[in-house]
Amino acid sequence: MTKLDLSQFKPVPGFDSLKLKAEIQAEILHETAGMTAVEVREFFRRESEAFQAEITRLRALKQT
């Protein structure tokens, strides 16, 4: 396992990662309110697939 060199990542002035995390968590809580455990699992499966598709799309764009 190689060590990740974090020096390549510079802080973005004015960006609050904890605020973003809280906002995303609140959005997910709102979207999954009233769902059963099975429905929540399906929600995350669909979101994961959509995220993977977006990563694949962006990688393809980067290589062109």
Image (cartoon, rainbow, N blue to C red):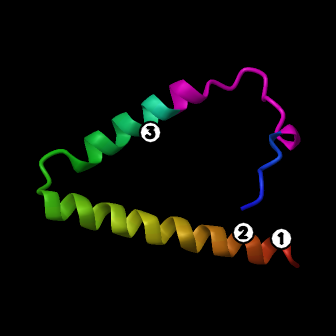
**10 magenta-colored:** yes
Q: Residue at x 18, y 44 (%)?
A: 33
**Amino acid type at image mark 2:** Leu
Q: Are marks 3 and 1 in contact (CB under 8 Å)?
A: no
Residue 62: mark in rendering: 1
Q: Judge the density around disc 2: few (<14), some (14-19), many (≥20) Cα neighbours within 10 Å.
A: few
Q: What stretch of residues is rendered in magenta?
A: 7-20
Query: Residue 38's quadrant in the figure?
Result: bottom left
Q: In the rendered structure, find residue 24 and report the number of the disc placed on it.
A: 3
Left or right of residue 46, residue 57 in this image: right
Q: Residue furthest top?
A: 14
Q: Amino acid at mark 1?
A: Lys
Residue type at mark 3 is Ile
User: Local crowd at mark 3 within 10 Å, few (<14), some, or many (≥20)?
Assistant: few
Looking at the image, which is closer to me, 41 or 29? 41
The answer to which quarter of the image holds residue 7 is top right
Where 55 sits versus 9, above or below? below
Q: Which residue is mark 2?
A: 58
The Cα–Cα distance between marks 3 and 1, rounded to whole angstroms, is 27 Å
Dots 2, 1 in contact, CB < 8 A: yes
Q: What residue is drawn where x is 44% and y is 39%?
A: 24
Q: Secondary structure at mark 1?
A: helix
- Asked if residue 16 is among those painted magenta in the image, a careful observer would answer yes
